[in-house]
Image: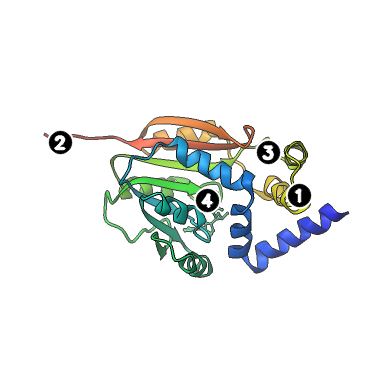
Amino acid sequence: MIQSILRARILATAVLNPPLLFSQLFGYDWYRDTMLDWVSDLKIPTGAKILELGCGPGNLSAHLAQLGYEVVGVDKSERMIKHALSLESKALFVEADAYDLPFEVAAFDVIILASLFNLVPDRPKLLLEIHRALKPGGVVSVQFPLPKFDANIAKNISSKRNLPPLSTAAMTVWASVGKKLNTTQIHDEFAKAGFDNISTKLHLENNIASVSGSKANTNVA
Ligand SMILES: C[S@@+](CC[C@H](N)C(=O)[O-])C[C@H]1O[C@@H](n2cnc3c(N)ncnc32)[C@H](O)[C@@H]1O
């Protein structure tokens, strides 16, 4: 009973105040660690220029800027960008559509997307734009839930970790309504878009995946 009330509260926040919801999620260890383990696995070199697409309220971009990277967070939602700017971090935040980025060709070393690649209607078009914005040798990495991640798995993980009720409800909502992708399909799409060195990593007890690839490093003689 309490769980269904909490889930309803989370769903209402998703509709009424998305920046608040995604900031609250970043406050939960399991959500934050899923993101931080992912970006740490990427072993991004010092001084790299990072673009985060679908940055939401900006917490991950702000964290990366804090680590010393040059970071740009992009989101098409004015409310998300307004919230991100209120963090007063060193990251730059820009309101823009990920399909049509206001940046030069080959502007970034790394482009990351958490819970955006699984939402967009046209992934090949987005990959084309990412390819354009990446430097040769640059890396793209997208994170998304796997098809097996469901409410029961979320409840099991939460009970094993002794999570408080609201945190449990948040994970259960993500597992129930988050759009899922399978890694084989994403590998194919990356390859078709011209990315090399495609690899997968698993997070949150193998329920969340990240797929990464690099833009070919063409040396023109
Ligand atoms: C599910 S939220 C993820 C937020 C954050 N990355 C996270 O994982 O907590 C998806 C975000 O992508 C943004 N978004 C959706 N379509 C977009 C697009 N075409 N271009 C830029 N941002 C987009 C939404 O406004 C939203 O902030």
Residue at (48, 43) in percent of width and height: 142
Q: How far is disc 3 from disc 4 in space, using C-alphas?
A: 17 Å
| Residue 21 appears anywhere in the view | yes
Front-most of 10 and 184?
10
Q: Is residue 83 above or below residue 208?
A: below
**In 3D space, how far apart are the residues under numbered discs 2 and 4 (Cα atoms)?**
34 Å
Task: Rate crowding at label 1 as few (under 14), some (14 to 19) or many (20 or more) other CA atoms within 10 Å.
Answer: few
Q: Earlier in the sequence, mark 3 or mark 4?
A: 4
Query: From mark 1 to mark 4, how far is it between C-alphas?
Result: 27 Å
Q: Residue at x 18, y 34 (%)?
A: 219
* Residue type at numbered disc 2: Val
* Three-letter residue code for mark 4: Leu
Count numbered badges in the picture.
4
Element under disc 1: loop
Asked whether mark 1 and ligand 1 are closer than 8 Å, the reply comes as no
Mark 2 = which residue? Answer: 220
Name which of mark 3 and mark 1 comes first in the sequence: 3
Confirm or reject: label 4 Cβ below 8 Å from ligand 1: yes
x, y percentage for residue 14?
66, 62
- Residue type, numbered disc 3: Phe
Q: Which residue is mark 1?
A: 164
Q: Say whether marks 3 and 4 touch (CB < 8 Å).
A: no
Which numbered disc, 2 or 4, marks the residue that appears first in the sequence?
4
Q: Which residue is mark 4?
A: 116
Q: Residue furthest left?
A: 221
Residue ID at (52%, 65%):
80
Instruction: Decide if residue 179 is in sight here.
Output: no
